[in-house]
Image (tube, rainbow, N blue to C red):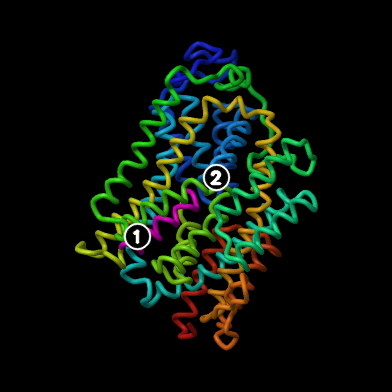
Amino acid sequence: MAATAGIRTAQAPGAAAPGAPPPVTLAEAVPVWARIAALSFGGPAGQIAVMHRVLVEEKHWISENRFLHALNFCTLLPGPEAQQLATYVGWLMHGTRGGLVAGGLFVLPGVVAIMALSWVYALYGNVGLVAGLFFGLKAAVLAIVLQAVIRIGKRALKGPVMVGLAATAFVAIFFLDVPFPLIVLTAGVIGYLGGRAGLPQFKAGGHGGAGKVVDGPFLLDDHELPRERAAAGHTLRMLLVWGAIWLVPVAAILLALGSDDVFAQVAVFFSKMAMVTFGGAYAVLSYVAQQAVEHYGWLKPGEMLDGLGMAETTPGPLIMVTQFVGFMAAFRNPGALPPLVAGTLGGLLTTWVTFAPCFLWIFVGAPYVERLRGNRALAGALSAITAAVVGVILNLAVWFALHTVFAETKPFAAGPVRFDVPVLSSLNPWALALAAAAVLAVFRFKAGMVPTLAACAAAGVGLHVAGLV
């Protein structure tokens, strides 16, 4: 096993516990990370389960406790926790190069797939069978988002305090238009203070994604973990290098094109988003959808659902839907560039500023992860943020439902309260029927995500062929 860059460990590089698997080179690890990336469907829970099965159960590369400890650390960070978990384990095994390989490969299939689908959507999205395909996908996405609300709610809402936080978050974002970052910050402060005071209501629970306990020995066992500390200069070096990788392109675009250019808007907006994406993709997508549709006008409401349908049906983090948003923003505001070229550059720029910070958080923070163990205040902050996220995801489900089942909505405002209400005469009965069928399939018959998406997409195509949509 190669030495981990920038840290000191209890064992000599390449050492392993008696009976553990033999040391693994980076070249030998690449096919395993590629396999994990190709199987990374189903959102964070499914992706974490795949990693657990391969890394812990099959390969015995990392122990159960160490895997869960890494996962708990990643849930404290903004950004997609599954991608960051892959980066973290890759870093543990082979240093910075290993983290880059594991985290980069985790994203690569989604980048390619979403870019291809964005081209198809831009060229043919409102034509023929493609329109029917996405009509069906929207209905399935509604059921999947509702399932996410219930799944996360069961884990996070362990008492009246957490239920109150979730309800307050929903009211704040849906009725009062409070920005998502402010909701996250407020919940985090409340949880931090509650955890620091030792209140049992703010004690964080376990994470539900990992699976069963597996016996060792392992290549990376538990006893190494407490002795890891950052070497001198490592933190500053990582901050400078990854800060530059992330922010220098953003600054160059701002200086060259000005703040009103679509590329500058994309770079700045998604850079800010990368710092507040606590709680997973479903939570932040509510914020992205509202900003992209209502503030910038990059997308129409239904198109955000189309993008989420793409991300649900392709491997990689669900947050890859942001690449579709960046693509469509630049495609519709190409300036002097051909629209497809502008869209491609906009999508790649979005992906860059979304995921470059993920590597920064891991490479800077991972050496200090032991200092977070048992910290009641940080555990309380995470618990409160997770509860607030339930309310934010519920807002996402309601917002998507309004714009899928009804062709038109109208704004309602009374003092600080403002939200969209449906125009009842614009109800689309086929959209309602498909959404109801998707909900029934997911909750009554326990159908998986991929079969539900496939069935709804096929139904959408059939309705289009029949001339009903």
Which portion, as a residue range, is magenta?
Answer: 317-330
Question: Residue at 38% of width from left, 36% of height from top?
Answer: 243
Q: Is residue 274 visible?
A: yes
In this view, the residue in front, 66 or 388, is 388
Q: Distance between the residues labelled 1 and 2?
A: 25 Å
Q: Residue 3 at x, y = what percent?
A: 44, 18
Q: Residues within 10 Å of mark 1 (few under 14, many from 20)?
A: many
Depicted 136 relative to depicted 75: above or below? below
Depicted 211 relative to depicted 447: above or below? above
- Residue lying furthest front in this view? 415
Question: Residue at 41% of width from left, 40% of height from top?
Answer: 105
- Residue lying furthest bottom in this view? 425
- Residue lying furthest left in this view? 336
Question: Residue at 44% of width from left, 69% of height from top?
Answer: 303
Q: Is residue 56 left or right of residue 347?
A: right
Which numbered dot is residue 47?
2
Amino acid type shown at disc 2: Gln
Amino acid type shown at disc 1: Phe
Depicted 169 relative to depicted 427: above or below? above
Q: Residue 177 at x, y = what percent?
A: 57, 65
**Disc 1, SS:** helix
- Residue lying furthest top in this view? 12
In this view, the residue in front, 331 or 430, is 331
Give the residue pinned by disc 1: 327
Question: Residue at 36% of width from left, 52% of height from top?
Answer: 267
Q: Residues within 10 Å of mark 2 (few under 14, many from 20)?
A: many
Magenta span: predominant SS is: helix
